[in-house]
Structures are given as C-alpha cells and as structure tokens.
Amino acid sequence: MVLVIGSGVGGAIIGMELAKANIPVTIIEKGPFCHVKDSYKYYDSDKIDDNLDLSKTVCVGGSSVVAAGNGVRLLEEELAKYDVDISKELDEVEELIGVHQMDDSHFGKGTKKFIEAAKSIGLQVSKMPKFIREEDCVKCGNCAWGCPNDAKWSSQDFIKIAIENGAKLIDNIEVTEIIHEKNSVKGVNIKNSDGSTKIIESDTIILSAGAIDSAIILQNSGIKAGEKLFVDPFVTVGGIIKDINYNREVTMNALVVGGNFVLAPHYSTILNENIDDNSVKKGDILSIMVKIPDDNNGKIVDGEVIKENTIKDVRFIAEGAATAGAILVKAGVDPTTIVSTHLRGAHPGGTAPIGDIVDENLETKYKGLFVSDASVIPEAPGAPPILAILALSKRLSKYLIKKQK
Ligand SMILES: Cc1cc2nc3c(=O)[nH]c(=O)nc-3n(C[C@H](O)[C@H](O)[C@H](O)COP(=O)(O)OP(=O)(O)OC[C@H]3O[C@@H](n4cnc5c(N)ncnc54)[C@H](O)[C@@H]3O)c2cc1C
C-alpha cells in the first residue's frame, strides 16, 4: 500500500492517479474534510515576524481551497536543468483542471481600470489564466476565503475521485515522523486527535505536507531538509475610488509581468485598516498585488520558520510598488490615499529541493521515500506554483504506476 501524506496540491493528484490505476493507496491528512466554502476557518498562518505573515490552510485540499484560481505555467526551463521535463504533464494538468482565460463577462469595473491604466503607461497586460468555471462563479470576490459555489477547481475534487476509485482517506490525523531502517522507508508515526500515537507501515511513502510541514516531518525523522526556503512575498497596494466595488470582482483576473515582479489587481481588508478614515468602505478601494521571487534564504529550525528579507527583496518590492502606484493614479485613485499592506507570503517552497534532498524522480536517499509538493521546487518562481506542483506530482504518479506494475 502506498501512503500519501497530505491531501493538498502535491498529494491529492497522486492519490487520484494511483487509485485510478488500481494501486492501493491511503491518504493521511492533518485537517478535516470541510466544505470549500468553510475553508477560511482552517487558515493556519505562521507569523514569521512583525513584517511577514505566511498563509496556508490545514484541511483536505490544502491551500488549493483558498487559492485565487490562477493557473500559471512556469518552471519548465528551470526544472529541465535538473533533467526534469514537465512540459507534457503541464499540458495534461491544464486540461484536467480546465485552465483558461475567463470570459469578458467576468471582468468588472476595477479590473478594466487596471488593464486600461497599465496599458496607458506602456505596460504589457494579459488576462490571468484561471481554473474557475464562469457558469458557477457568482463574482463575489471570495476566492481566498473558500468559493461559496464550488466554481473553482481545488484538490478536494481529486480527493473525491480518488475515494470513488478505492483510495482511503484518513483525515484529522497528523504524521509526525517517517520511520526508516538501513536507508529504506518502513512507515510513519501518526498522532491521533486524542494525542495517542500509532505506526502505519508502508514501503512507499509520498510526503506532500507542504513546504513547511514536509520539512518539519523530515527533520523529526533525522533527514536533512528545511533550508533554502522561499515564500514569494507580496504586498497589496491600494487607495480610494468611491464605489468601485473591486472587492466584489473575480480576484487577480489580469497580470502584468515586470522584470523583477508581477502585478495583479487584488483586494485586501488590511488596506481598510491602514487607511486613516473609518468611513471608507471595502467597495471604495482599488488595489494591486505586487509579488516578487525572493532569495531562497529562509530555513526551518526547531519547527519555526526563519526568513529575512534581503536588500534585493526590498528593492524588487519597491520597484513593483512604485509601478502599482503609477497604475492606480492613472486609474483614478486619489494619490493621497494610497497605502500598502505589510509583507505576506502564500507560496512557501524549496525546503527539499530537487538536486539536493530529492533526485529527478523526487526520491530521497531513503529508498521508497518521495517528496512531492512545493518543497521540491529548487528556485523561487515569484508566481503561482499550483500548475508546476501538479505537473511534478503527475509525473511522479506515472513513475510509481510503471514501477508497481
Ligand atoms: C490565499 C492563497 C491563495 C493562493 N492562490 C494561488 C493561486 O491562485 N494559484 C497558485 O498556483 N497558487 C496559489 N497559492 C499557493 C498554492 O496554494 C500553494 O503553493 C500550494 O497549495 C502548495 O501545495 P503543496 O502540496 O505544497 O501544499 P498544500 O496544498 O498546502 O498541501 C499540504 C497538505 O498537507 C497537510 N498536512 C500538513 N502537515 C501534515 C501532517 N503532519 N500530517 C498530515 N497532513 C499534513 C495540510 O493540511 C495540507 O492539506 C495560494 C495560496 C494561498 C494561501
């Protein structure tokens, strides 16, 4: 029996593919199987310091349940340097989750202003590739709180297919340690919600607990991991345009790719807190996310995330924020009202990178122990990584299916 640890982006697709190939598979998930619309309750953010929050959710589906639905194709060239070709798998996963540019009916006033203003100052703007179905999307702007209408693909969709095909899902159980002997994997230690512990045996284990938790589990097991962490930090910069109601639009539906940053329209309630005027409503703000690829200089020590911003990170954020400010002013935002959020991160990765902790087949030096989630990404993409993680896991599924038959 194959054990998959974590039911998020990296784990769910492997559970589904193995189950469809009639390979016995059990998926162990720390969080509960909640409805996607309730997933905001399962945010488990790490406050790294006063200047940086790291967001993730602990529930079936992992952080995909709160994703903005952006399906950006990336890391093909970077991974090719490590003899990992994901081009075919990227095509396959784009098809599987229905990546497409949304119909014009799903572009609201705020997004249109962003597009026009960015173009007018000479920037190239494109529609964001999305995995959101127009027919179910009610344009509520709640993607990052859990879609109320299941209009967006999430890894829960794959978990349901996995179960239909015979996979076993055990939720509300935490894996604490990998058991290995003589360089081969033997099983995992689990902790039940009542605190009791148990061993589950398996000679094939796929660790997909996300870049922070996979690293912690590896470290608990005496296996090197947890260095070279990146988080792709972002800020949201915005100001007042009365009654623009951007907070009720499909989030991040357009994209500007700069040399050192990407920009996309994005609303955050933190902006309301930071504007010194209590009469400003959520619907009075137009705002833009500025995201950068950061240095892989973070690490995990004793279960804690340690990450400092480098001069380069600060410079890239400043460049992006200045460009966002120029777009906002062109779009009609009152320049005297523009504020920013603090730095946040939503794409942790790099803690068990290919070429160091895992090989080109995502196997560690312990036979039968694989890692397949954002941990294995060797370079910070500075852009949404779901498609790349799905493609890597799809590729690993093919390898495992071939090996087991
Ligand atoms: C608000 C937000 C919006 C985002 N939007 C996008 C987007 O639009 N497009 C995009 O490409 N990316 C987006 N991302 C990033 C994307 O969601 C993550 O990069 C991706 O989910 C990482 O996949 P993963 O498999 O590494 O981890 P996850 O998907 O987080 O899966 C890890 C799973 O492991 C479980 N787990 C953790 N510890 C244990 C344990 N000890 N035992 C058992 N199970 C455990 C967790 O509960 C979780 O279910 C967003 C992230 C956030 C937070």
Image: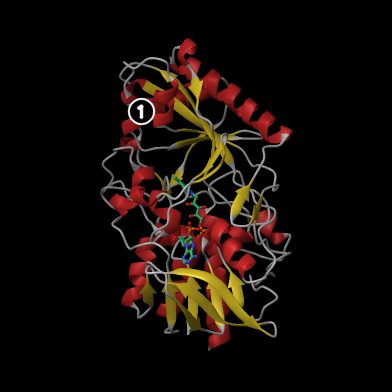
Residue 314 higher or lower than 15, as above or below: above
Q: Position of residue 21 (x, y in %)?
A: 44, 81
Closer to the camera in the image, 62 or 151: 62
Cβ at disc 1 under 8 Å from ligand 1: no
Residue under the point 67% across and 70% down: 222
Residue 221 in picture, x, y percent from top left: 62, 71
For the point 70% across and 66% down, which residue is it?
224
Q: Residue at x 40, y 56 (%)?
A: 98
191 relative to 268, above or below: below
- Residue at (49, 12) in percent of width and height: 335
Query: Which image quadrant for residue 34?
Result: bottom left
Q: Nearer the viewer, residue 70 or 289?
A: 289
Spot the residue most to the bottom: 405
List the residue tagged with mark 1. Answer: 246
- Decide if residue 368 is in sight here: no
Query: How did the renderer colour the structure?
Result: secondary structure
Residue 281 occupies which quadrant of the picture? Answer: top left
Vertical comparison of 223 with 203: above or below: above
Q: Is residue 225 visible?
A: yes
Mark 1 residue element: helix
Residue 272 on image: x %, y %: 39, 24
Q: How many marks overall?
A: 1
- Residue 397, given in percent of the width and then of the height, sits at 53, 74
Q: Residue furthest front?
A: 195
Dot 1 amino acid type: Tyr
Judge by depth and name the residue closer to the eye, 113 or 404: 404
Classed neighbour count for the residue bearing mark 1: other residues with Cα under 10 Å, few (<14), some (14–19), many (≥20): many
The picture quadrant where one finds residue 220 is bottom right
